Image (tube, coloured by chain):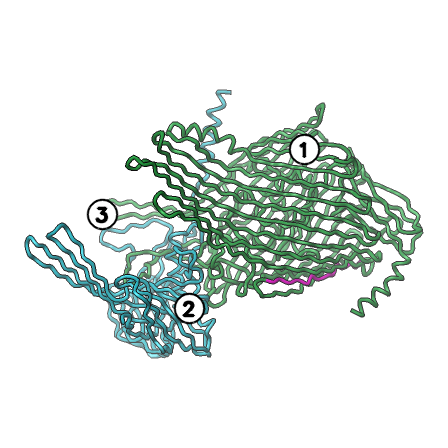
Chain colours: A green, B cyan
Amino acid sequence: MKKAITILLLLLPLCATAQTLSGTVTDRATGETLIGATVLDATTGKGTVTNAHGRYSLTLKGSTSAHLRVSFVGYKVFERDITLDGDHTVNAQLEAALVLKEVEVTADRISRTKVSQMSAIEVPVEQIKLVPVIFGETDVLKAIQLLPGVQSGTEGMSGIYVRGGGPDQNLFLLDGIPLYNVNHLGGFFSAFNGDAIKNVTLYKGSFPSHFAGRISSVLDITTNNGNDKEWHGSGSVGLISAKVNVEGPIVKEQTTLSLSLRRTYGDLLIMPLVKAATLSEGIRGASAGYYFYDLNGKLTHRFSDRSRLYATWYSGDDAAYIGFNETENPLEHYGMKFGYNWGNLATAVRWNYELTPKLFMNLTGSFTRYRQKLGIGIEEETLEYGTLVSNEAELSVRSGIADVTVRADFDYSPLPEHAIKFGATAVNHHFTPQVQGTHITVTGIQPVDTTYGEQSINAQEMNLYFGDDWSIAEPLKVNIGAVLSGFLVEGRFYPSVQPRLSSRLLLSDDLSFKAGYSYMTQYLHLLSTSNISLPTDLWVPVTARIEPMNSHQVAAGIFYDWRSLLDISVEGYYKWMNNLLEYKPGSTFFGSSEGWENMVCMGRGWAYGVEFLVQKSVGDITGWIGYTWSRTMRQFDRPGEELNGGRVFPAKYDRIHDLSITLQYKPDNTFDAGVTWVYSTGNTATIAMQEVEMDAGQYWSEQMRVVDERNNFRLPAYHRMDVSVNFHKQKKHGVRTWSISVYNLYNRQNPFIIYPRSVQRDDGHGTTYSTVLMQRSLFPIMPSISYIYKF
Amino acid sequence: MRHCIFPTLAALVMLLAACEKQIDIDVDARQPEVVVRALGETGEPLAVRLTYSRPVFGTFYVPNGEGYFKEIADATVSLSVDGSPHSGVNVDGGNYTFAYQPQAGDHLVLSVAVPGHKTVTAEAVVPQIPAVSGIGVSHGTDQERGIRNNTIAFTLADPASSTDYYSVRLRCHETSIYTKYDADSNIVWTDTTRNEYYCDFKCTDYTVISSTGIDVIDPEDPDAANTYVGDEMLFSDANINGNQHQFKLEPYGYYEYEDYDNYYGYDTIERYMNSRDYYLEVSAISRDTYMYLQSVDAYDYDEVLALFSEPVQIHSNVSGGIGIFGIRTKVSFKLQLND
């Protein structure tokens, strides 16, 4: 402690001779803060980028003047000369460039080559919106799946598998709030409405110290603040959903509101069909359907240039239901209803305050909840010996997780060479295992009204972090930090010290070498029954027996910035993962956390690979080409918890080759088009190849299918091409867009599930047995069209 | 427009119908393999059963009168015990029985030569006799005639020097006497049958069941978390290594006898009377046997919910083929479940 104080005292004089430029970078037309904008002093060449709140702090030393240049892709450069006679606040309002000339918008940008952070990719939201997707639904996760090092799960699913990690090892942050279930409709759509999103950054390794809690990736998503000048909006109608987005000032340039709503409407369309089909059978009041919706809201209030308040709201739910009433005669009827609801609620209040030009503070209080509820009810009224008898029975099952979080983050730039981040987080996790409610009323019998399993588990998680983005010398920069973490559950405390390091050595002005290391710990596990995302998936904490997952990851790579137009990188990584969970063979799980510890086994895994990325973010043609060569292995050899006899086996999503090409073409504001082609080695699967006599004591008549090795079969390669075109036209009150997309253009039949099909034929003298392996594809060529109107 | 509808619909139907197709399987996976099943017990002649496996994928013909699995009757089966060959095998179809009776500590090597296949080998060491003591029965109260919540206790002393695996079973010898009296003919029929089986019991001792691995949850009773229910409890010494541990088991069902009468009108009476003797069997087993039995146990369960669970791998310790070679070193105790 004494040493730290001494160092701070030594630093103070240095600070006194330095001047700091700070401020916010915004879009001039909308007032929207710009994340990742480059702020550069052209005189000294020193620069920085804006943080997640659009703020920057640039400390300069030994200069009397500065020539500030602020740039951002798609905007004209903002320039200002400043006399450095003290600290200055310079808020830059950038004007969108109508005609983008690549040189103008890229001359000053701090490319991926120059930053010390590695294994992170920022995908412009405009590019995400141009990626062709199924049913025309813009989907952040589907776009993220196209990046190197990221693999998709099963066909059409939104789950992501990053550098050999599982789907539960990704931290999804929406304005800093973790979301536990980011899927709709079993994973075919993600919970992120593209219209509400401003910025998306994926971290695959070398994690900055302000992230903690998952061992494989962090997807940091920031939503729009809203236009602070005037009201705007958009509406769209697609094949399966409709969306509305409005944003504008409640108090001009002071308080803004942004609201986005998306809802599927398939249930509304099929409702008349269901009623018509069932009414003829004497069934009234029939209903059946499924829908999901997302509601994103954000209220922003600017107290001053130094102080802003944000209130964020997200709620998204899925609902599946079916029910009917069947009438025998005017007195008797029978009714049934079934409902299944699941979804997230996340809300946060954040306060930004610039304590000094060098010290920026962000305080957050948030609440996030995922819950599922299943309800089944029957009721009947019948005449028995002239007496009307009423019976009712209801069964409900619910479970979930809810977090309350308080968090303080600080950005501190005491010297030109240091950009320090530090902070603390405290989380209270409230786990609700399966709670069953039973309500039975039967004429003549004592009613039952009982609830089982209502005990819940509370756990506390604490994190302290510190990180310094330190320019040691002109070519050498390191981002060094650590997270001190602890998790308290049922009287047991799990501490963890997680060092983080990312370094950059500038070999020339456009070429750099980077290396990094990170250690991550995860205190939560996802109990999941199958390989697709089901709403029954349930989060549970670590226990006395089930230890926290952790990972060590090293990565190194070469980064090249070609003429400020192309970011080219080659990254290699090796990741060790410990205390991974897998279900024991034959074990199943259906939304109950009771006894789950005995159904799982713990083991380890490792993944290694090389990722190539060529990314072009500016110009008429944008996009990226990503290729990954990787292997992902698992070993479960603890006594009593062996899988595959304790031998090493490839993970389910061990895909050796993974290639994606994503291109967008936008020559002007009336037309744009996108094309995506993906290719990957097929998933692995466990297939029994032999049948043997079953060991059933003294009985020998049964047969048993034998698997020699886990994940012993490689499915056919996966590949697919999607295209989309958008036609925009300026109308009297806004811009209308017709969006046409085709998923799986050449109708490739990619495997969704595989299964054996057996045929048995008896000819009187004997029996012919024949079995073949079949695959079923989910999506053939799928054209879609949607209409969008922006005003 | 009308001219477009039917071609479009036809094309759509063809596309959807084409969503299913056959996947090619490696030809090597279509060859039958030699299957060895040799799970013996100390004090009993060692029996080896040999059959061919059936490749899952492919087409084959089974004439009437032949079994689905073909027995291997032309194999040369040899056994060596502690390095010395053991002769004297009796062959009956695919069943090969040695006069040799395994003894604790024996090191066995089994070799099977089948024409047209590479030689199949397997090794096993007969485990040491488990140190079981303090067998006792705590008699519960009668719930109804013949049903009572008894508790069986025994103490197992686990050696510290090795990782050991155990099996606990409850064997039931049942004698059923069936009597029928027909008043019209004044005839009484009596038939006696004897049956042996392993009966279900439960164990709630978390120290033990946390190392049982599989099937510790009663699927029909979600409240019974951390409860083993089944007819063979397999566990490792992970939690009791080098220590003595007292086990408590609760058998299910009738503990002594049951009898009941059926009346058909006034002239015919059927009477069933079943009496039972119980034996506690504690066996020391090898790791391979433990994993094999575990996987077979899990396979039964997988049949029901296979769609939602990972496929079960049947453990094999047979080189060049499929199967199990292992010996149970068993100690057995007759139990007095009635007062």
Instruction: Answer yes or no: are tags 1 and 3 on the same subunit.
Output: yes
- Quarter occupied by the N terminus of chain A: bottom right
Mark 1 vs mark 3, foreground winner is 1
Q: Is residue B262 visible?
A: yes
| Chain for disc number 1 | A
Give, as a single range, the part of the protein colored magenta.
A475-488
Q: How many other residues sit within 10 Å of disc 2, few (<14), some (14-19) or many (≥20)?
A: many
User: Which secondary structure lies at badge 1?
Assistant: strand
Which amino acid is tagged 1?
Asp
In the picture, measured across the screen, residue A563 lies left or right of residue A665, that is right
User: Which secondary structure lies at badge 3?
Assistant: loop
Question: Relative to the observer, which residue lies in front, A706 or B249?
Answer: B249
Residue B235: which numbered mark, if any? Answer: 2
Q: How many other residues sit within 10 Å of disc 1, few (<14), some (14-19) or many (≥20)?
A: some
In the picture, measured across the screen, residue A149 lies left or right of residue A78, that is left
Which amino acid is tagged 3?
His
| Chain for disc number 2 | B
Q: Quadrant of residue B188?
A: bottom left
In the picture, measured across the screen, residue A708 lies left or right of residue A372, that is left
Residue A197 position within the rendered picture, expressed as x and y whole percent measured from the top left? 67, 41
Mark 3 = which residue? A765
| Chain for disc number 3 | A
